[in-house]
Image: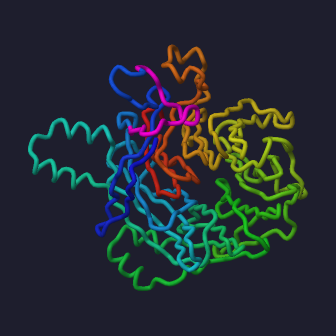
Amino acid sequence: MSAPEEDTFPNEDGDMEEMEAGGSDDDGMGDEGKPGEDEGKVYVPGVEPLQPGEELEMDRSAYRMYHECQTGAPCLSFDVLRDGNGDSREQYPMSMLLCAGTQADAALSNRLLVIRMHNLHGTEEKEKEGDESSDGESEEEEDEDKKPQMELAMMPHYGGINRVRVTRRGEQALAAVWSEKAQVEIFDLRSQVDAVHSSAAMSAFIKQQKEATPLFSFSGHMTEGFAIDWSPKVPGRLVSGDCKKNIHVWEPREEGTSWQIDQRPFSSHSKSVEDLQWSPTEPTVFASCSVDQSIRVWDIRAPPNSMLSANEAHSSDVNVISWNRSEPFLLSGGDDGLLKVWDLRQFQSGRPVANFKQHMAPVTSVEWNPVDSSVFAASGADDVVSQWDLSVESCDVGARAEGVKDLPPQLLFLHQGQTEIKEIHWHPQLPGVMISTALSGFNVFRTISV
């Protein structure tokens, strides 16, 4: 669903000003049309183009929460930094910490950002207040109190940032950054995290601001890359992959400021490594995907050859993978627009256990829900974020409106409104909350479906 032709930026007070953008679920992906015309017809992205003059409008009732913002230059990769405010937080207002890297037009204009978003209220809450409020002045005051807020701590970074991943290691908040400089760099984000929580710390941070200095950097890849992941089982362990097919494993040294990197890369792929993911349960096992159309599973205790492989996993580049946290499933998305679910117990068969074709362009990001092992999300170059639930079967759906009968029953929701969506993440501490980044900025939302 198309968004209005207006942008949003943090204002001087750090507010995240909102604009409407499109989204809908499979029961309400809807162009309402004129009364009496095409009653029951549902708009499905990619199936039928909009006619001249037609526009799609957001149905706010399909969202429990929706906010959006911009940070200047587009951030085409980001990650969620866990905070100390507890898990399973469902009460509004919400808050979150993100780390993102920009891809500006000029190498000198790039930034590594820590973003704190807070005072994030739900859509239902706003609707109720709107219904109950009768006093114009008090309504304005309430609206001011409900404004979402954002603080940015920005470190200059020479070169566009291809991908950023974050982790906690003791007192450290670490970001691993793949950049167009053909280097992988590790940054300690503590001063930035302090700055977004305190005005005094922010003032001190701004005064000292200079080009970001990494704790550690590695130029051994000899070319740029995109694939990188921190181990969830061994603090500080990292894996990185490049556009020349090589994968390196990093082991942290005890002092916490340097890493030992293997001299013999894992190199069974024949083309660029596009994504990497550590197993959530096995500390020595990781998976990779590549332009060579394969997905491979490796064990760092074995010689540098993959343990398992699906050599023709997709019919073209395999762009992204995600490892289920509690089930032996791997999710993949490719240039062919397909989403595939692989059971690692049957991986060598080369046949996925589920196969979905809903995106009309290459898949740019996939991720399992961290608290519901049957739910996952994906984004595509068709400017759509899709949410899915594998536990839904055809018999669970019942009667459907015209236009959605042929959709997979597992498809829960289609979210639109952004341009060139690059990456999505579920928030690990806010159930059902999703963040997406695109050329047009960030969306933070929770749908009624998850």
Q: Position of residue 396 (x, y in %)?
A: 55, 17
Helix, strand or loop for the magenta stretch, by majority: loop
Q: Locate residue 95: give its quadrant.
A: bottom left
User: Is-magenta flag for residue 161?
Assistant: no
Q: Is residue 220 left or right of residue 2?
A: right
250 up-or-down from 23: above or below: below
User: Is-magenta flag for residue 47?
Assistant: yes
Question: Residue, x 53% and y 68% (percent of image)?
Answer: 171
Q: Locate residue 128: give its quadrant.
A: top left
44 up-or-down from 361: above or below: above
Number of labels in the image equals 0
Q: Is residue 64 left or right of residue 326?
A: left
Question: Which one is nearer the viewer's eye here, 33 or 122?
Answer: 33
Question: Residue, x 44% and y 71% (percent of image)?
Answer: 153
Question: Which one is nearer the viewer's eye here, 272 or 78?
Answer: 272
Q: Position of residue 299 (x, y in %)?
A: 82, 52
The span picked out in magenta is 39-58
